[in-house]
Image: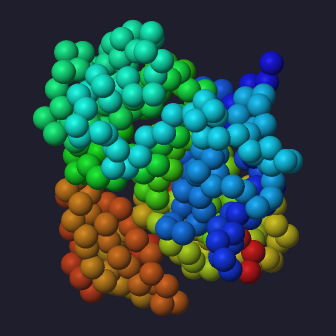
Amino acid sequence: MSDVAVECRGLTKSFDVVSAVRNLDLAVEQGEILVLLGPSGCGKTTTLRLIAGLEVPDAGSIRIGNQPVAGEGVFVATEKRRIGMVFQDYALFPHLSVSQNIAFGVPQRASETRVQDGLRVVGLCGVGGRMPHELSGGQQQRVALARALAPHPAVLLLDEPFSNLDAGLRLQVRSEIRDILKANRLTAIFVTHDQDEALFMGDRIAVFNAGSLEQVGTPEELFFAPASRFVAEFMGQADFIRGEITEHGLQTEIGPVLQPVTLAVGQRVEVAIRADDVSLVADPQSKAKVLGRSFRGAVNVYRVRLPSGRIVHSLQPHTLKLADGLLVRVQAEPGHPLAHFAI
């Protein structure tokens, strides 16, 4: 039996002259949380809607488990695809109780058991008789999850499910829901534009850009080994400095970085460097200058202009305070290989 829960092959969808999804190949393993990540308009929500059966592909095919559901002359209706959906606005029926919301669409003979199981799974036992407006935003989101799970779907689809929650509650609820998904070994496809949320939620992340898939990998793979400049820039707000390949690594305007390289010696490159990779030391002989400081509580993030005019950021303890205009020596101390791209 296949371990693939969802498989898309050559998936393509356009709206008028806009190509929303281009020739997409993507597979989701059983029990995996796959995050679809990218900026607005990149194709991630369209991909989710194609998998759900809410859109018809122009080309390509989709399989859920071993069943073809779209393409090659087949199109299976949404309600027959064994999927559950959780929307960003919860989409609860305001005139139905929590239990009635969860039971909606479940065969009557199984509804009571499914409702109680759902309430237990999401940690809301005892609230089945309450109405949606009597619940907090986080509780409503968990009811929406219980309703999506009640029909025992093969795959759970979540479209920006935390975007309507305030920042503190969003952190709490996403942790709770990830724990629920993993504890129950559920397969889920999760759409977000938030990099931090993607890194937290995903077993793997699929990064989209202008309708195309840029890279699929674990959070660590995408963060430390981006396959393109777009992924490097999108995952973690990287700065880019010029460099050159040497026999032992990279030579950059802020000094050498010893690391393995695959490009030819002498190749000019752009090097992706993040704030936690950069150290600063006051040095009146340097030509790099502190432009400003952003206080983030436990840390300060400094903005520094290099002699070339390029800007880099440096993350430092909140106890280190450097004045605007201070000349500093800037060094790369990443502790890991830096991603670099030929120019």
Q: Relative to 228, say whether 111 is above or below.
A: above
Q: Residue at x 35, y 44 (%)?
A: 91
Picture coordinates of residue 118, whole percent (x, y) = 37, 19
Left or right of 242, for residue 122: left
Write down the quadrant of residue 220 in the picture: top right
Picture coordinates of residue 335, whole percent (x, y) = 54, 51
Closer to us: 59 or 213? 59
Residue 306 shows up from this direction: yes
Q: Residue at x 38, y 67 (%)?
A: 314
Q: Residue at x 51, y 34 (%)?
A: 84
Q: Relative to 46, say whether 307 is above or below.
A: below
Closer to us: 328 or 169? 169
Residue 258 shows up from this direction: no
Picture coordinates of residue 199, whole percent (x, y) = 48, 46
Left or right of 12, for residue 323: left
Q: Residue at x 45, y 11 (%)?
A: 110
Q: Relative to 240, say whether 73 is above or below.
A: above
